[in-house]
Amino acid sequence: MTIDMMDNWLAGEHAQYAPALLTADEAVEIYNAWMKNRFGENTDFSGFSLNRQSHGKYVIHGEQYYFFPTEDRVTYWYNILVNMATGEMFFVSMHDGMFWTEDIMTLDNWFDVNAVSMFR
């Protein structure tokens, strides 16, 4: 999936996939290390493990990302983008229903806002 400005598409400036600096497995390991560093062995967050087999690729404003859903189908709304060059991570929430939306924010910010209230 490519997300870019409409003017770029109309001008014929399409983003192209370049060779990734990180493999999908390395991207998952970066995420796992981040989770372990942030939460230790807290099992409350075990439902947020990423599905290595079912990843996709996004291009957002010229940057390439791996897109990973969770392994747990109950947390279908929890998805992660990992920058293929830098390893920077973003949370992607996909809301279903009549008014489908997609929210993207840094993973740190999402957990800062939501993690404490989720497990009280």
Image (spheres, rainbow, N blue to C red):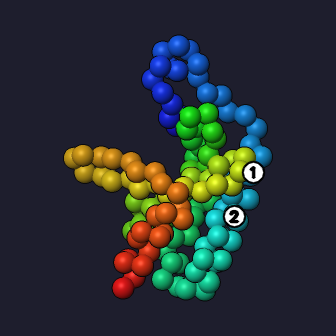
- The local crowd at label 1, few if under 14, some if 14 to 19, many if 20 or more residues have their Cα within 10 Å, is some
Q: Can residue 54 be seen in this view?
A: no
Tell me the quadrant of the picture where the C terminus can be found.
bottom left
Report whether 96 appears left or right of 62.
Answer: left
Q: How far apart are marks 1 and 2 (CA)?
A: 10 Å
- The local crowd at label 2, few if under 14, some if 14 to 19, many if 20 or more residues have their Cα within 10 Å, is some
Q: Residue at x 47, y 19 (%)?
A: 7
Secondary structure found at label 1: loop
Residue 26: quarter of image = bottom right
Q: Name the residue under label 1.
A: 22
- Observer-nearest of 105 and 96: 105
Q: Can residue 46 be seen in this view?
A: yes
Q: Where is residue 58 in the image (x, y as percent from the top left)?
A: 57, 41
Labels 1 and 2: the sequence-earlier one: 1
Circles 1 and 2 in contact, beta carbons < 8 Å:
yes
Which label was assigned to residue 110?
Answer: none
Q: Residue at x 50, y 35 (%)?
A: 3
- Observer-nearest of 91 and 23: 91
Q: Where is residue 48 in the image (x, y as percent from the top left)?
A: 51, 70
Q: What residue type is labelled 1?
A: Leu
Secondary structure found at label 2: helix
Q: Which residue is drawn at 48% across and 83% down?
A: 44
Q: Which amino acid does label 2 sit on?
A: Ile
Q: Mark 2 points at which residue?
A: 30
Residue 30: quarter of image = bottom right
Q: Position of residue 10 (x, y in %)?
A: 48, 15
Q: Which residue is drawn at 30% across and 52% down?
A: 96
Residue 75: quarter of image = bottom left
